[in-house]
Each structure stands twice: as C-alpha cells, then as structure tokens.
Image (cartoon, rainbow, N blue to C red):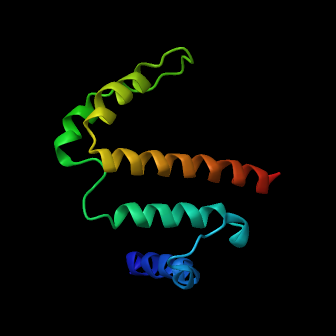
Amino acid sequence: MTEVLHILSRANVLQPFIFFIGQVISLETFGDPHLAAILLKKYIKDLPEPLFPERLYPTIRRCPPPTDDPSDISSVTYIRDSILRELMPCAYILLSNVLRKQFHISIFAANVMN
C-alpha cells in the first residue's frame, strides 16, 4: 500500500507539467527546485536504454571510493578516464546536460533558501 501511495504522490507532483509538454519549463515559474529533480529523474528512468549499460557495471564497481582528502582526485580521474570513455556518445551528451542542469538547480535552490 505504501508503494501505491508513493506512486500516486509522484503522479500528483508531475500533473502540472502535463500542460507544458514541448515547452520550456522555468524553475522560476514553479519556484521549487525539487520538481526539476523529479522531472530529470523521471526522464532518465523512462529512457529506452540505461545511461550506464550493464556491461559497464564491473568497470563502475572498480571505481575507487572518494576520500576526505581534498587533493585526492583518484575517483574523478577514474570516472573520467575509465567510465565516461565507455559511454555511447548520445549517453555522454545527455549525462553532460543533466549534470549541467543539476548544477543550475543547486544554484537556484541555494538562492531560494537565502
């Protein structure tokens, strides 16, 4: 029952966006950066192929964990040199755009909070 309520609550959150299909959605219009995150998550989940295909799972699992040392960039280097190079060009472009949008969402959220 909890799962059904969760699905229904997500559907209600996305309901206002049905009228905006094919139009630009502005964060300022809705004032809630979490809605943008929900839309991005839904879009990625609904892709016909995953951004990170199953064949990449062993490579992803070998990624060194991040550390508390700010000078340790081994995780970033591994992701850049081993994982991202294995992505299909269309997945790489989509991921790049999604990360850019998330950056803008985080700036917007920080401004809303202040």
Whether residue 62 is situated above or below residue 15 in the rendered picture: above
Percent coordinates x, y for residue 99 in the rendering: 50, 46
Q: Is residue 49 left or right of residue 18?
A: left
Percent coordinates x, y for residue 110 in the rendering: 74, 49
* 30 and 7: which is toward the camera: 30
- Quarter of the rendering occupied by the N terminus: bottom left
Whether residue 25 is situated above or below residue 98 in the rendered picture: below
At 45% across and 26% down in the image, what residue appears? Answer: 66
At 33% across and 35% down in the image, what residue appears? Answer: 84
At 83% across and 51% down in the image, what residue appears? Answer: 114
Percent coordinates x, y for residue 68 in the rendering: 54, 21
Q: Residue at the far right: name it.
A: 114
Image quadrant assignment for residue 29: bottom right
* 28 and 7: which is toward the camera: 28
The mark tally for this picture is 0
Percent coordinates x, y for residue 37 in the rendering: 54, 60
Q: Residue at the far left: name it.
A: 55
At 49% across and 75% down in the image, what residue appears? Answer: 10
Q: Is residue 20 left or right of residue 27?
A: left
* 80 and 67: which is toward the camera: 80
Whether residue 37 is situated above or below residue 7 in the rendered picture: above
Q: Is residue 114 left or right of residue 102?
A: right
Image quadrant assignment for residue 79: top left
